[in-house]
Image (tube, rainbow, N blue to C red):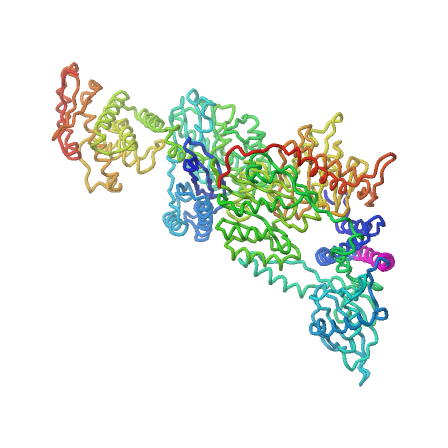
Amino acid sequence: MSEILNKESVAVIDIGSSAIRMLIAEIDSKGTIRHLENLQKPTAFGRDVFATGHISTKTMRQAIEVLKNYRSLMNDYGVKKYQAVTTSAVRDAVNRDSFIDQAFVRAGLDVEVLEAPEESRLELIAVETALADKVALDQKRCLITEVGSGSTEMIVLNQGAVEINRNFAIGSMRLPEDTVLGSVDAQVLARLIKRAVRQICAGENRDCHFQDLGTFIGLGGDMRKAAQHLSADLSNQTFTTLDKKEFTSYLKNISKKTAEEIAKEHGMALDEAEAYQAALFLCGAFLAETGAEEIIVPMMSIRDAILQEMAQMFSGYKRTDLSKQVLNSARHLGEKFGYDKTGAACVASLSIKLFDALTKDHGLGTRGRLLLEVAALLHGIGAYVSIAGYHKHSSYLIQAADLFGLRKSDKTIVSTVVRYHRKTAPKSTHVDYMSLNRNDRAMVSKLAAILRVACALNESSQQLIKNIEVEAGEDAYTIWVSSDLGDLSLEVEAVRRRGDLFLEVFGAPIALRQKKL
Amino acid sequence: MTKELPLFERDLSWIEFNFRVFEEARNPQVPLLERLRFLGIVSSNFDEFFMVRVPAHEEQPAFQKQVYEKAFGLMREQEKYFREELLPQLEAQGIRRLALLRLEEAQRTFLTRYFKEEMLPLLTPIALTESGELPFLTNLALYRVFKMKKESSGEEICGLVELPKTLPRMITLPSAGNLDFFLAEDLVSLFARELFIGYEIQDEALLRIARSVDMELDEEKDQDFAKVMSEALRMRRKNTIVRMEASGSRAAFEIVQKKLGLPESRIFCAPDWIDLKEIGALAFRPIFLDLKYPEWEPVSVVDWDDDISVWDTLKQRDLLVHHPYESFDLFLRFLKEAAHDPDVLAIKQTLYRAAQSSHVVGLLEKAALSGKKVTVLIELKARFDEERNIDWANRLIQAGATVLYGVAGYKTHAKICLVVRREPEGLKRYVHLATGNYNERTARIYTDFGFFTSHNEMTQDATAFFNVVTGFSQPVGFARIDMAPYTLRQKLEKLIEREILRSTPDRPGLIILKMNSLADPDLISRLYRASQAGVHIRLNVRGICCLVPGLKGVSENIEVVSLVDRFLEHSRIFYFQNGGHDEIYLSSADWMPRNLDRRLEILFPLIDRKLKKRILDFLQDVFRDNQKARGLNSKGEYILKQPAEGEKPYRVQEALCHEALKRQKNIKAALPEIRPQKPKTT
């Protein structure tokens, strides 16, 4: 019986634009996942929100009923750990908070709104899990797209590193302007979509030449359906590869058909078939922009990715760590604004060393560490706009940019840390800072204090200081560096001056000293 | 396409099936009481046919007329045969309908007492004048009608008495050695003067009406299906009368006919007997055993060790049970172990038609009472079984089970039972899938397959099935099982198309199908195409078959055989040769539009090679039958098969009974060693 204790039933609920889905699975201490239940119920969130911006009472009531059913099934399995997330439609709804409240009060489910970057992160986990060891992503330039009902995610991976990460408000149910599903001929629709996608890619052209992307990965339910339709038996396979020619001829084929015909042929409901058509056109349009000759379709969804994370947490064995992708994406942003690459890397490295040395004093975890590193990498990008008040420029640039894997609150933290890395300290009159919760505000102060010191250590911009030792005394902190480094009076003075926030936050002054190390 | 498609009309094909049943009733090789039983089946079939099918042709009067004529033709033959042939033979064996004059004194006394004490209190004699309003006539009840003259005034009126449904129509009389019976309608006649005092009886007749039962329920409106169903049953009272059976004097029932405004074409006049259903039921009584087939006692499943738990066995292998050759007890044991096992968390099951005092319902009740999560999907729209169905629902709800009444608009016809069990290796699921209902009684007389497995994908699919029927989910993620009305039809289409593609002149494709009814025009047209592509198609279709076999250039590679024997052929098996990688599917569905498009049905593959072989052997044996099988020709005639030159008579149902007994004797000794790998968890 003891083995039973090492297993747990968990659930993932995904509240999407066209369907509410749930996976119940059993995970064990080795991180193995066994699916027990797989459910799906249609919902009109997308139809409501993309047309009116609002979830109608009827749709909300139906969705709550579905969630109540799911909850009861979770109870049957004794599920305690679950993650309920919602994406595009609910995310964009004016009354999303009422829905989330209703879900909690009436179905007993705590629903989390997944932001686009978080979605991207999960998508990448899905891709990495599905292709694990079988496709060497670190040797390719590839485009990953996931066409959802209300939005399309795009990730450009260069030699395994995230370069670009975008989210567009176009999806299988949210079409280019003036197009309404079912109102235009499929071939016209395909053309409109192609034009829209071309514009999107042209907009990114400065950062990336799409034709250089030799690998195309298509995520999403509709791509999986297409793969199932075009491939032989896919059971037990985590991904499949479709030939570009075969796929485009299939696209051509379905563009000649009405949604009714597709529905009948594929055993779908009519609106499902309409969305299927649109989603594949979108995918096909992205594919056409790249130089890829085949499409890799991972047979995994973000639900699987969440499950994967839960299993990793349960087993304590972490296979997919995407923090390096967050940093890659930050570096790519830095390059876009012509940042001082080596300087930024040096400050980032020093920040992390300080952070690690001060673990006991700041009490922050891996999230804080990652955000500090991102802030350190990007603290100088505002110089692109103007050197005067560059910290403020850096701050708003970060706020506006797409950074892989960071949710809105994460980005606000990074942007405020950068904002406070010089000059004024946080104040209760600063709106962005005050929009954070108390814990996050405390984090901002601590990280900004550390970043200030790290910047001071590179005051000369010569990257003289690379290794440090931090000594925490009774009433003062000392940073020891090697006496071999020669004259560091600039840095010593800078640390004294810019240690102001440090003193305030950590309650003791910090000084730079040299000794024989 | 359908218009040019050569098809036998489905209702005429159905009447044709009843001709085959009637042929069995006339077969002198068949024991006397079994013949009587077949006659009863024909009667009961026609009751249902008139109520459900005939009203559908209201818009095509010419065709409807044809249906009436054909059906009445068969009923006439049936009555004549019963009266002239069977009755004298029954009498010779001591089963006698006694007329008044043949009664002995003791029998008279008995009848007088019976009438006064048992029957009279239940009778409501009604006097019907020319201008009076006709009382409501109950569906399928027998009425005695009299033409009478008021002795005082000479006024002619009609007397009407409904025979109580709660009393038997055949009243068994005290008798030495014989089975003497008196009919309830005769008893009412005998005492008519006491019912209508002051009247002179001039003529009399017996009547029975059938009403259409085409139910259209607005399921969206009312959430409480049970209430809707009770309502529906009451509503049925007002439905149109589709048939009136009458025997006796026309003068006696003329006034009723006039008041009902019933056209002559809907009246079936028999010289003597109407409604042989209840007479046929005599064959079910445990008497005159020598006039019946020897009682068949299904054998317990032989390659099964009683000392090992169901779960441990199913973890090792799948199991196939062939009813009625093998007993239904194994399923009851499966359910019983589930009900009592503390590690079982949940049981989910469909119930379409359960037996009157059902062990299945009892066990589910027990499981629910012991705190397991029991979900039962009860089909309340199973034709004519509604009253009983509502009763189960209430019993189960009281025990704490979740009772669902199916998906609005679709009948649940699939037969699935799913058990979820907590085991050291994690949650484990076991499933029983079947071609026949969870009914202990019919499992003794219908041929069906039951299949047990713990195969992960199959159990996963069974779980998904329940999520669909409970309304928790759309159909998603089915790996092995196909479900109507979602993917089952497409799957069959694909299987036929694949067989066409795989078929070559050197190695022609082969499709063998066994089912109860084949009436789907689209699938039939695909079978025609397959035949034209050289695929050999062997069909064993017991009942309705709209496919026309043996048409040159259309269906010359198709052979159709119908098997009508003592057990009702009920299993649905679909075999596809698939270029040597043969596939066998079992299903709850017939190939009819209603099954594929308007019912929740399942189709599941057999994976185990041994089991596949067993089914294939069986399919081949079914076609070897040359005693009870009839081949269908392109003209729509069913010709009884005869042993060919040098061929031995072979009757598949009999052979399977022998085989089952033999297996029970032999294999018991050589039982395969199955021991659990892990200790049982309790």
Q: Is residue A174 above or below residue A202?
A: below
> Would you say B303 lies left or right of B528 here?
left
Residue at the limit of the structure toward the bottom, as seen here = B152
Task: Give the quarter of the image for residue B475.
Answer: top right
Whether residue B54 appears in this view of the structure is yes
Pick the front one: A471 or B358: B358
Pick the front one: B122 or A275: B122
Q: Is residue B277 above or below residue B555?
A: below
Queried whether the magenta region covers residue B71, the answer comes back as: yes
Whether residue A261 appears in this view of the structure is no
Residue B315 in percent (x, y) is at 55, 35
Queried whether the magenta region covers residue A153, the answer comes back as: no
Pick the front one: A158 or B118: B118
Q: Residue at x 74, y 43 (%)?
A: B541
Pick the front one: B632 or A398: B632
Q: Residue at x 57, y 27 (%)?
A: A246
Residue A426 in percent (x, y) is at 19, 37
> Would you say A456 lies left or right of A415 here?
left
Count of residue discs: 0
The range drawn in magenta is B68-91
Task: Check the picture and name the quadrant holding the N terminus of chain B.
Answer: top right
Residue A201 in percent (x, y) is at 43, 29
Task: Give the quarter of the image for residue B209.
Answer: bottom right
> Would you say B276 lies left or right of A267 here?
right
Q: Would you say the magenta stretch is mainly helix, strand or loop?
A: helix
Residue B467 in percent (x, y) is at 52, 45
